[in-house]
Amino acid sequence: MSEVESVVPEGRRGLLGPGVVVAAGLAVGQVLAYALAVLGARVLGPSRFGELSTLNNLLVIGAVVALAVQTVAARRVAAGEPGSDPPALARLGTRASTAVTVVGLVVVPIAVVALRLPAVATFAVALTLWPLTAVGVGLGRAQGDQHFVRLGALYTVLGVLRVGSSIVVLVATRSVTATVLAALVGTAIAWVLVRAIEGLPLSAGGRLHADVRSETLHTTHALLAMFVFTSCDLLLARLVLPATEVGEYAAGSVVLKIAFWLPQVVAVVLFPRLARGDRRSLLVGTVAVVALGLAVTLGFALVGPTLLPRLMGAAYADIATQSWIFGLAGTAEAAAYLLLFSRLAARDRLAAVAVWGAVVALGLVVLTVAHHSPAQIAVAVAVVATALCVVGVWANLRSSA
């Protein structure tokens, strides 16, 4: 355990100290991601920026397996359960990485045709899933051990190599395909470094423990539902809006993602405690998530109409005046995300049902009613995500009764 962490007894560690450490690591990747979005909006134009944003959203959906692997590893390490030793973790990473990459390659032709995406770039996104998923094992080990200084460093390494390299290539080439290929190379290098830092073997033979395999599948299922829900808005926008308005929605979704991702440090820090049955942490975490999201919303309500056009260009002036709506949507999604993690910590295998219901509800609302403007889609996201939060609160109250 690091010197910073060892001075505070485990049972008395608050949210602030570890949160700051992990937030610093996460912030590197998120700031770089926002910089990539801002630069993409300026140098690619609305149509090609829509392409890049759609490709990034496909990667986010595919990366759900990486998060599932991290979550399973963190929970088992935190609880000291079988499957938490380095060879078993390496085995889990290898099996999961191979499986998700194969699925991604199968989906490539469908995505190219249905979403009108460049073939080479879409193929590169599928290949990126292998190292990205393998990295999840190392992150999960550090998270489960509550080695938050090291976890923050690992997040920094991944962010700089995956997103930082994309920014450099985007500026140099102004090519969507080259930008995505840079992310592939950067993520592969990050995997090698994280494996070495966490002391994980390159591979491990043998079979996965049945319970580990089952938990990984169920966790992947639940997180897939959540990430489809938090990512399908842009895909739906691409289906129902003209190309220029898709680019405007992509610009607004930058605000949504800030409000969604900024509070995620809360889930990262609290998950090991939730895995040990600390329910009070859920109340504290929910309040923190909502407060952070509303702060982002208020900030963009005040400065968004001036700031966003300066950062992204005059073409996004109209959507900038409605940026606070995207902030509310992101806040509701962030709260639903934390509540889902509380159910995963309790190994609730029914949690995914409610999330898939939210995906269906959002699709129906957008396709039938809220498809006339980017702002209408953002309102639909906010309403459906809030309803999902209500279901999550009810599930936690019922389980603790």
Image (tube, helix red, strand yellow):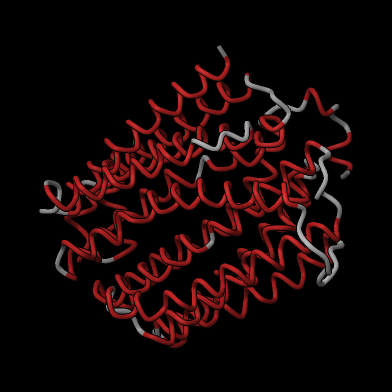
> Where's residue 208, x and y in %?
76, 58
How many marks the image carries: the answer is 0
- Closer to us: 122 or 208: 208
> Where's residue 43, x and y in %?
34, 77
| Quarter of the image where the N terminus is located | top right
Residue at 49% from the left image edge and 73% from the top image edge? 104
Q: Is 115 on the left or on the right of 204, as rendered?
A: left
Q: Is 30 on the left or on the right of 206, as rendered?
A: left
Q: In the rendered view, tell whether residue 166 sits above or below residue 326.
A: below
Q: In the rendered view, tell whether residue 76 sits above or below residue 122.
A: above
- Closer to us: 382 or 45: 382
> Where's residue 59, x and y in %?
47, 66
> Where's residue 24, x and y in %?
64, 49
- Closer to us: 33 or 349: 349
Q: In the rendered view, tell whether residue 371 sits above or below residue 35.
A: above
Residue at 50% from the left image edge and 17% from the top image edge? 398
Which residue ends up furthest to the top in the rendered image? Answer: 401
Residue at 69% from the left image edge and 70% from the top image edge? 190
- Closer to us: 136 or 33: 136
Q: In the rendered view, tell whether residue 395 sits above or below residue 128.
A: above
| Quarter of the image where the C terminus is located | top right
Residue at 80% from the left image edge and 24% from the top image edge? 11
